Each structure stands twice: as structure tokens, then as C-alpha cells.
Image: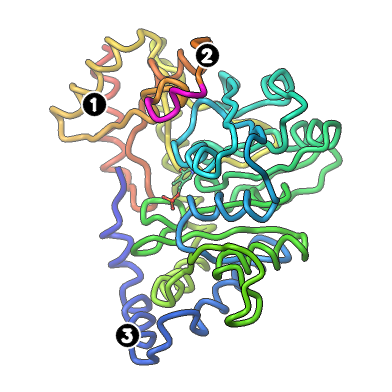
Amino acid sequence: MVDLKSQYLKLKTDLDKAVLDCMASTAYINGPEVKRFQHQLEQFLGVKHVIPCANGTDALQIAMMALDLKMGDEVIVPAFTYVATAEVIALLKLVPVMVDVDPKTFNITAETLEKAITNRTKAIVPVHLFGQTADMEAILAIAQKYNLFVIEDNAQAIGADYTFAHGKSQKAGTIGDFGCTSFFPSKNLGCYGDGGALMTNNDVLAARARSIANHGQSQQYFHEETGVNSRLDSLQAAILNVKLPHLNQFNQARRAAADFYDAAFESIDDLQTPIRTQNSTHVFHQYTLQVRGGQKQRAALQQHLKNQGIPAMIYYPLPLYRQKAFANYWDGRTLRVTEKLCNTVISLPIHTEMNTDILNYIATQVTSFFD
Ligand SMILES: *Cc1c(COP(=O)(O)O)cnc(C)c1O
């Protein structure tokens, strides 16, 4: 699905030097590379504060702790997402409320979320799924109307631009009270292990999140609250410092691959290609098709591709509410679009090192299946 080896070889000289220098420096925890990455990412995103942490799941947890969400508070999440989004909510004894998504963007909308608001709702977690920003302007309006916090799960859309109606653009992840992201190796900006970060423009929230990520202390050995230990390793920061200047180019390469696929599949009636919205750039963390024939046709396509040596993955096969882990939060009602997507989506390989030969081969194999 991704080609991390070719990307590494392209940047090998710089990456090897950064890692070796960091090892020689012995500043393995909170070293200068971490501060440098923080500032570099703040500048890239145009956000006041970046708080590096150990992974994207921790970033979400720290955001919810910093917002003082309390046992029983309801947090609205899409039912069609990766488990991490809702996992931390349950872990903190908050209540994940799962809502349906838009059939075109796969993201929550103002309409789907407003219906789920109760007097216990405290926060919304829009997930910018597969690399495209949710409709933040409409979501912010609802959040304001009901006095709710907004935590963007930006693990899949780092570098995407969201444009407001009046023309101003902001980077995905810098729009809500907090944005959370992951540097898992296969993400659009990946390190060589685990890594993550929170983003915020709010000074008070930034200080609180930074303290929580560091055992609840703002001064060493003086602990104001119960926190966690969640740090970005200096070695991972050194790798990210080399890779971040290439992020726009990485995302552009993904978009070019998506353009190629779009053109190749345009005339296949049985496939729906990804739909790009006007108000967000798409950074194609995944290139996700919908197979109109449903589960059976999709399984046959996946097998056909596998036989030709092409991996294709189902993100995601099960709505969150059907996951056994969340059985306690499910009243048995199903969500129409989420159910349909789980039965029809399939993602093709997409990464920064796709070339015409690879794209042609994959496109030909997909097309031949439908001939
Ligand atoms: C990857 C991912 C996460 C979690 O990130 P980790 O660094 O693996 O903890 C959270 N949400 C979404 C949507 C993701 O894709």
C-alpha cells in the first residue's frame, strides 16, 4: 500500500546524518531536535502551538483531558473512522456518540451531528478522513451554537488546506480548539516509529496539554494534576525535521497519483471515484473507491488484484458501533451511509513514490476486472 523504502532511499543522506548526529548528541529525550520540529511544524501549519507527543491516539486523549471533559460527557464522533478516535473517549469514561457521514466526503456534517446533540454533549471530533477536511465552517457554527469544543482528528490530512466562504484558508488541524495528528510511518508525514502532536492557537489550552503530556507538571517535580508520559523521541523528531520540508511535495505526489486513477476509472460505471470538495484540498492519505456491486463484487475485485500482486485494503470494514469494544454504547440502530460505505469501499495503493509504470499496471488490472 505504501513504499517507505524508496522514499527513504531518496532522502537517505539527510536522514542518516540526522539520526547519527542525534545519537552522538545523547539528547534522546526532549532534545533540541524536538523543539526544532515543534517550531518548524508551527510555522508550516501557521498555528501558534504544536505540542509533540508519543502518537496520534495520545494526542486525542491529551486534548480531551486538557478540555476537562468529565465522566459521562458525550463526545460526537463519526461512525466511519479508525478506532482510535473513539477509543480514548471510552478510556476516559466519556461517552462516544457515533453519527453518520456524508456519502460523498465520508466526513461528518453539520446535519448529521446536530441531530445527535443532547444536553450532555461537550465536544465534537471531526475526522478529516482519507485526507480531506470535514466542512469545518458549518461544524464550527454548530459548535458555537451549542457551546461545544471541537477536536480535529487530523491524523490523515496533515498539510490539507481548508478554505472558508469569505476566502481565508487555514491548514487542517488548526481550526478547532485542538487538532491532533499522527506521525505513524504510513501517514502523509511519517516518522520511523510512533509519533504524534497536538495543535492549538489557544495559549491556556497549549500550556495545559503540554503539562498533561509531561506527568501533569509545568515545573519539574511539582505536579498540578494527573497526567501521562507522552513524548516524541528526539530521534523521531530528527527524522521529521528532514521530512517536513518535503511534505507539500509528498502531498502533491499523492494528488498526482489520484488524478491518474480518477482518469483511468472515470468510465467504469461500477466504480465511484473519490469526490473532491471545493473547500478543502485533498491530500489522499487513501485513494478510496466505492464498488457499486457491494460486498461480493468488492471481494472479487480485491482477490483479482491480489492475484496480480496488488494489495488493496478495506478501510473500514465495520462501523464503530458494531465493534465489540463499543457494544455498550450501541442501541442497535444502524446508520445508512456508514453501513453502505463499510460494504462498498476499497482503497488502492497510494504513496509518494508511485510512477507511471506502477500506476498503469494497477489501473490496467482494475479496469480489466470490470471489462
Ligand atoms: C492513525 C490514526 C490515529 C492514531 O494515530 P496513532 O499514531 O497510530 O496512535 C487516529 N485517528 C485516525 C483517523 C488515524 O488514521
Q: Which amino acid type corresponds to the residue marked 3 in the rendered image? A: Leu
- Provide the residue designation for mark 2: 331
Residue 218 vs residue 34, the one in the foreground: 218
Q: Residue at x 33, y 61 (%)?
A: 7
Estimate the x, y position of residue 143 in percent, counting from the top left.
79, 35
Q: Which amino acid type corresponds to the residue marked 1 in the rendered image? A: Gln
Above or below, 132 against 331 in this view is: below
Estimate the x, y position of residue 343 in percent, counting from the top left.
38, 15
Near mark 2 (Cα within 10 A), the count class, few <14, some 14-19 or many ≥20, is few
In this view, the residue farthest toward the left is 307
Res. 365 mark: 1
Res. 259 mark: none
Near mark 3 (Cα within 10 A), the count class, few <14, some 14-19 or many ≥20, is few
Residue 225 vs residue 253, the one in the foreground: 225
Question: Helix or strand or loop: what does disc 2 sit on?
Answer: loop
Query: Reading the chain from its start, which is encountered first: label 2 or label 3?
Result: 3
Q: Which amino acid type corresponds to the residue marked 2 in the rendered image? A: Asp
Which quadrant is home to the C terminus?
A: top left
CB of mark 2 within 8 Å of CB of mark 3? Answer: no
Estimate the x, y position of residue 95 in percent, counting from the top left.
59, 32
- In the image, is residue 326 part of the stretch drawn in magenta? yes
Q: Which residues are magenta?
A: 324-329
Q: Main secondary structure of the magenta part?
A: helix
Q: Residue at x 69, y 21 (%)?
A: 116
Res. 20 mark: 3
Q: Nearer the viewer, mark 2 or mark 3?
A: 2
